[in-house]
Image (cartoon, rainbow, N blue to C red):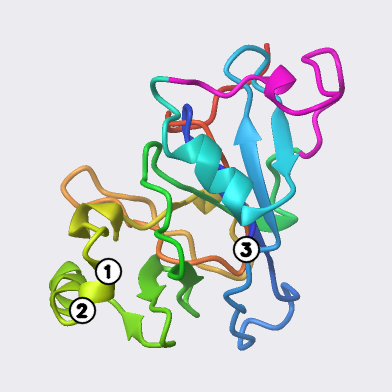
């Protein structure tokens, strides 16, 4: 799953999309890239690991990402990747805490592309889908006494509807309806910029 946020200062991720001629094919929930958007030049930069992505994302508002935070990278260099419909992009919220050591945060895209879902995998391999579940787990595992429920965030990434495959019906969002939230990634780019929509280079 590609993470990084296309939202202003949020991380975004991208997932590979199934062939547009095969609408029956369900997307996978594997993120293929993690990206972040520069607060100065607005270019997208690919990150090497999910850990690096989480490091930038956890304090993105107070410490915005800029290109020179990556070794050998400056705003003068061409963008590493561009937002387009060749893959599905999802935007993560900025300031989501880093996943506690031993746990894994998993975001997956529903097969109908309607939203993303978030769950956490424990060191024992159990998957927890709700905050009450995390609270219960921590209470029953004294070895995790240094970890707080606030270290976990179930806010799902937001799907960039304009990057969905052509065969997916993109129903316009009514002003009276809630906007669909993203839950997981199939060929998704997560970016590191917290404003929706992503900033454009003029």
User: Within 10 angstroms of label 3, few (less than 14), some, or many (20 or more) residues?
Assistant: many
Q: Which residue is drawn at 58% across and 45% down?
A: 53
Circle nearer the viewer, 2 or 1: 1
Q: Do the residues labelled 2 and 1 touch (CB within 8 Å)?
A: yes
Q: Residue at x 73, y 42 (%)?
A: 46
Q: Nearer the viewer, residue 45 or 113?
A: 45
Q: Which mark is residue 112?
A: none
Circle nearer the viewer, 1 or 3: 1
Q: Which of the two labelled residues, at mark 2 and mark 1, occupies the earlier sequence position?
A: 2
The stretch in magenta equals 63-81
Circle nearer the viewer, 3 or 2: 2
Mark 1–mark 3 distance (CA, rounded to whole Å): 28 Å
Q: Is residue 12 magenta?
A: no
Mark 3–mark 2 distance (CA, rounded to whole Å): 26 Å
Q: Residue 144 carries which label?
A: 1
Q: Residue at x 71, y 75 (%)?
A: 18
Q: Are marks 1 and 3 in contact (CB under 8 Å)?
A: no
Residue at the spot of label 2 = 137
**Residue 192 in the figure: left or right of residue 96:** right
Question: Could you tell me which secondary element the residue under label 1 belongs to?
Answer: helix
Q: In this view, does 71 lie above or below 115?
A: above
**Residue 41 in the figure: left or right of residue 56:** right
Q: In this view, does 56 lie above or below 168?
A: above
Whole-percent x, y for residue 122 in the image: 38, 78
Whole-percent x, y for residue 97 in the image: 36, 46
Residue at the spot of label 3 = 1
**Residue 73 in the figure: left or right of residue 4:** right
């Amino acid at each position: 799953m590609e993470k990084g946020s296309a939202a202003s200062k949020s991380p975004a991720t991208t997932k590979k999309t199934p062939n547009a001629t095969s609408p029956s094919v369900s997307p996978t929930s594997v993120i293929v890239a993690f990206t972040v958007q520069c607060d100065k030049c607005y270019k997208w930069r690919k990150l090497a690991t999910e850990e690096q992505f989480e490091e930038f994302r956890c304090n993105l508002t107070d410490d915005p990402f800029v290109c020179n935070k990556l070794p050998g990278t400056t705003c003068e260099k061409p963008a590493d990747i561009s937002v387009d419909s060749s893959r599905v992009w999802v935007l993560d919220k900025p300031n989501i805490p880093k996943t506690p050591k031993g746990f894994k945060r998993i975001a997956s895209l529903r097969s109908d592309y309607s939203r993303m879902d978030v769950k956490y995998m424990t060191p024992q391999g159990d998957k927890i889908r709700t905050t009450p579940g995390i609270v219960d787990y921590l209470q029953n595992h004294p070895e995790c006494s240094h970890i707080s429920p606030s270290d976990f965030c179930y806010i799902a990434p937001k799907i960039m509807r304009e990057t969905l495959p052509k065969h997916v019906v993109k129903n316009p969002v009514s002003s009276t309806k809630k906007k669909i939230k993203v839950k997981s990634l199939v060929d998704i780019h997560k970016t590191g910029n917290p404003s929706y929509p992503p900033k454009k280079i003029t």
